[in-house]
Image (tube, coloured by chain):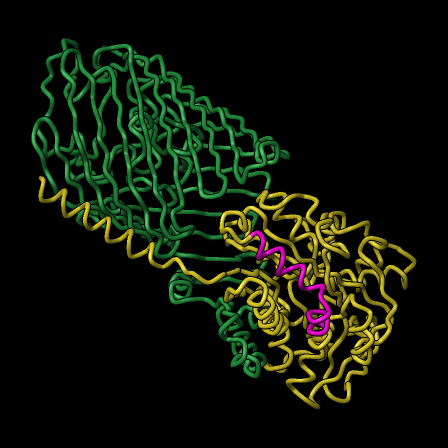
Amino acid sequence: MKLRLTHFVALTAALVSTFASQVKADDELLNVSYDPTRELYAEYNSAFAKYWKSKTGKDLHVDQSHGGSGKQARSVIDGLSADVVTLALAADIDAIADKGNLLPRDWQAKLPNNSSPYTSTIVFVVRKGNPKGIKDWDDLAKPGVGVVTPNPKTSGGARWNYLAAWAYGSRKLSSDETKVKEFLKAIYRNVEVLDTGARGSTTTFAQRGLGDVLIAWENEAHLIAKEFPGQTQIVIPSISILAEPPVAVVEKNAKKHGTTELAKAYLEYLYSPEAQEIAGKNFYRPRDAKALAKYSKNFPKLNLVTVDDEFGGWKKAQAKHFDDGGTFDQIYDK
Amino acid sequence: MTLASRTAHTAAHRLLQTAALTAVFVAGQAKADESTTRFIEPNTFDQLWSKAVLYKDDLNPWVEELKLRGRYQWQYYDVDTDRGDVHDDEHRRSRFGFDAKLFEKKVEVRVDAQSNDGFDDLYDGLVDAYIKYKPNDKLAITFGKTKPLIANYDWLESTNTQPTFERSQIFNQLGINRALGLTVQHTIDAFSWQAGVYSNNTPSTTDDTPDGIVNPTGSWGDGEFGDVNGDIGYSFTLGAGYDFKHLLNLEKADLWVNWLHSERQATDLVLNKYDNIVSTTAWLKEGYWGLVVEGFAAGGGEPVSSTAAYVNKDVFGFYVQPTYDVIPKKLQLVGRYTFSTGDGPASIQGQSRYERVSTLPSIPDNIPGPVSNKDKGDGYQAVYLGAQYFIYGDKLKVLAGGEWAELQRKGEDVDSLTLLAGLRLSF
C-alpha cells in the first residue's frame, strides 16, 4: 500500500509540475474577433506590441480567434477565455454581458464613440464588368441573380446586410412591413450559400466563383479587389447602414488572467493616430478626421442609416429580426 | 442552387477554404507579425471530434444535424479499508449513441446505450432515449427515458463535466435513476421552473434468456422503458430556480429547489426507496473559483409491502464542492466534503465504488432487522481531494484523486481510503 501511495503521489506531482511550467513570462492577450478583421489586427498587434514594449519593457503575444460574430460571442459565453472582444455589432457583446455576466451591461460607455474605434458599411461586390447590371438593392431581388451573404444567425456582418436591405425596402415600399418582407424574401430566395461568417462568404464568392453579387463589409470588398485585381468591382448602393463594430474588455476574464491593464491599453490604443491610420489602411473608416481624410478616396460618401434611428437600437433590432421566429425566420425560404 | 447541392458544401469544406483564402490574405504580413500574432485555427482535436458529426446543414428544414455521441471512462482504484485492501482497474463508463437535431432545431432526439466493464456485452442497457421539443431556448418538453428533474448538479449535470470520479454518497443513497417520463423546463428571465411525471417501472434487466429466466446484465435501472400501466408506481417532480448572477455580480450563481414525490408500489424498480426527496442546489462560479453546495432530505422510506426489500429511514445529507483553476482550462483542483446522517441504525449505505466493492469483505450484518443490513450504518462523511487535467476540455481529460470515507455504525466506525486515477473521454 505504501509503495503504491508513493507512486501515486509522485505521478500526480510530476503532472502538476509539468503543466505548471507552461506558464509564460511574456504578456499574452486573447482577442476574440469577427471574421474579416484578421488583417487589421495582425497589423495592429505589431504596432501595439511595440508601444507596449516601449511602455512596459515586456514582449507581447496576441492570440487571435476569428469567426462569425454571433458564433464568437457564444464561444465566449461558453468559456472561450477572451481578454478582449472586437466584434461586429453591439448585440453580440450585450449577449456576453447578459448571459455570461463577464462584463458590465454599460460596457459601451467605457470607450469613446460607443466603444467603436472605427466604422464600416455594407456594399456590393460584383464580377468584372458587372454582367448582371447590379446597381441597387432592387437588382438583388431579380430572378436569376445569384446572391452571396452570410447567415444572420451566426454572422454579425450578415445582420448588417439584412438591416441595410430592410432600410432600403422600407423607404421604397412606404414602410409597408408585409411588402418589405416580400422584398427581403425575394433577395434571400436568390441566396446560393449562407456561410457562417463574412470571410466564408468572401471565399465562396471570390475563390469558388459562386454568385453574381456578394453583400459585403466595405473593408472586405476592398480586400477582394486588392487580392484578386481586375476580377471584381465594387458597387455602392443608394442606401446602406452605418456599421459600428464595437470593442470591449471582457473584464472578468482579464481580471482572472491579470491582464486588465493590458487589455484596457490594447483597446484604448485603437483610438491613437497610429491605430487609426492602420484602420484606414485596412479599409475601415477611421474615427480620427486626419486618418479619414488621408484614406477618403476609399470611402465614398453614402446615404447611411443608423441602427439606432432606423431600428431603435440593437436590442430591438435583434429581437424583431434575428431571434427565433423573427422576420428573418419568416422570410427565409428554404 | 438546390437544397441538395447546398448541403454538399459541408462546414469542413468551407473551413478549409476559408483558411486557404485567409492564408493568401495574411501571407504578406505573416513574416512581420508572426512573433506577435498567433491565429487560433482548428487543432487536431477539433478536427478529430468533428468526425462525430455525420451530417450538418443549418439550412435543411428537416434534419439539421446527426451526430454520434459516446463516452468512455477508464479508472484505476486502490482501496484501503479496515477490512483489507484491493486495487484494480475498470472500464467505468462506456456509452454510445446518437443525437439528432430536427425541424429547425426545435426537436432533438437522443439515444444512448451502454456497455459493461470489459465489454462482455456491447449492449448492456439503455441510458437515454428521448425526444425533446424546444420551440425556443426558454422552453423544453421531453418525453422518453430521461433523468427525473432533481439534484441540479449531482444528477442533472452530466458526469462528463463533473470534476470527481463518482457522484456524492448522499445522492447515490437515494435510489434515483432514469425513468420513462414527461418533463417540462421553462425559463422566464432569471426565474426557471421544471416539472415531470415518471413511471417507476424501468427494469434492471437487459437479457432475458429464452427459457424465461431473468438474467440481469445491466445495472439497476438501466433496462429499457418498462410499463406505464398495471400495478406500478409513479413519481412526479417539481422544482424552481433563480439565477442570481447579475444580482451578486458573479459569473454563475444558480439556486434551485426540487421536490420528488413517489407513489411507490411493491413492484417498482426505480424511484422506489423514499416517498419524498427534496434537493437544494447552490452553484457559484467566479474567476478561478467554483463552488457547489447541494443538500438532500428524504423521508417515508418504510416498506410498501411485507416482502419489500427496502427499509429506508429518513436521511439528510449534503456535500460542499469547491474547485480552483490552477491553470484555467488546463488544470483544476477539486475538493468535496460529504456528510449524511439517518434515523435508523442501517439508514446509510457507503459507496459501491469503492468502499463496498464486491471484492472486499462486507461489514457483517450485526444490526437486527427484517432485511440485510450489511455495509450499512447511521452516518457517513467523506473528503475527496483531486485534480483534473484537461487535454481537450471536458471532452478528454485525466483525473486523479483520493477520498477518505467513514461509515458510522453503532460502536464501530469503518474507515476507507480510495485512490483513483483515470481518463474520461466524451464526444
A276 is within the stretch colored magenta? yes
Describe residue B414's horizontal placement relative to residue B33 as left or right: left
Could you tell me which quadrant the N terminus of chain B lies in?
bottom right
Q: Which image quadrant is residue A266 in?
A: bottom right
Q: Residue A136: horizontal and vertical position, in percent?
A: 83, 74
Instruction: State the residue at coordinates (61%, 72%).
Output: A47
Depth order, front residue of A265/B93 = A265
Instruction: State the residue at coordinates (37%, 56%).
Output: B392
Q: Residue B31: horizontal and vertical position, in percent?
A: 51, 81
Could you tell me which quadrant the C terminus of chain B lies in?
bottom left
The part of the chain drawn in magenta is: A260-279
Q: Colour of chain B?
A: green
A226 is within the stretch colored magenta? no
Say which chain is yellow: A
Residue A133, relative to residue A141: is it above or below? Answer: below
Instruction: State the residue at coordinates (58%, 69%).
Output: A45
